[in-house]
Image: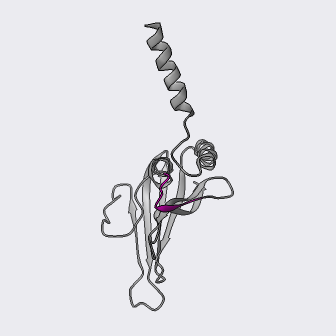
Amino acid sequence: MKVLVGLVFILSIISACEKNDINFNNDFEKSQKAWLNFKNASNNSYQYTVANGSWVGSGWETKLTVTNGVVTERYYKYTPAPDSNQPIIEWTENENELNTHTDSAAAETITLDKIYEKAQQDWLLKRDDSQTLFEVNDDGLLFQAGYIPNNCADDCFVGITIRDIKEI
């Protein structure tokens, strides 16, 4: 029995020392610590803006408001390409209306906790067939995490680009 316990202990130490399977692991861990500090200082109440765009010139943004760790508002604005005849589209969902606009490019209704989780479990995974991107802002908070498949020409980024994070 002692041998079995010792073997389990050694295996757990070896597995704990294996390198993580994500790119930018050290930078990600530093950013995650900065996030936890910001989360604590802001009482888990903040706004962040997800920005996106296309090579043809259209763009869209989603501003999410998180109050005490719960998404309470989602604002979306789509701006068409300059030479387009398409209208600007914008709307706001309050806490009781979240996710009612299902046919838009609005960002998911998730917290930064979930974004850090998705970055670690998907967007920053090491892939042989992709280029991985990771950036933080001046405060060390995640501003971009994702990947672009190799040999992809346009609008291929998979992940998130955050333009602004602020305490409320």
Across and down, in percent, residue 24 comes to 59, 51
Q: Is residue 13 magenta?
A: no
Residue 75 placed where, x, y %?
Answer: 44, 65
Count of labels in the image: 0
Residue 126 on the magenta span: yes
Relative to 20, does residue 142 appear above or below in the rendering?
below
Residue at image position (61%, 49%) is 31
Residue 63 visible within the image: no
Q: Is residue 30 visible?
A: yes
Residue 6, placed above or below residue 166: above
Q: Residue at x 47, y 55 (%)?
A: 127
Magenta residues, start to end: 125-134
Q: Quadrant of the N terminus?
A: top left
Occupied quadrant, residue 105 = bottom left
The answer to whether residue 19 is above or below residue 2 is below
Residue 149 at x, y percent in the picture: 45, 65
**Vertical order, 54 against 143 (above or below):** below
Q: Nearer the viewer, residue 47 or 18?
A: 18
Give how far across and how far down residue 136 sits, in percent: 62, 57
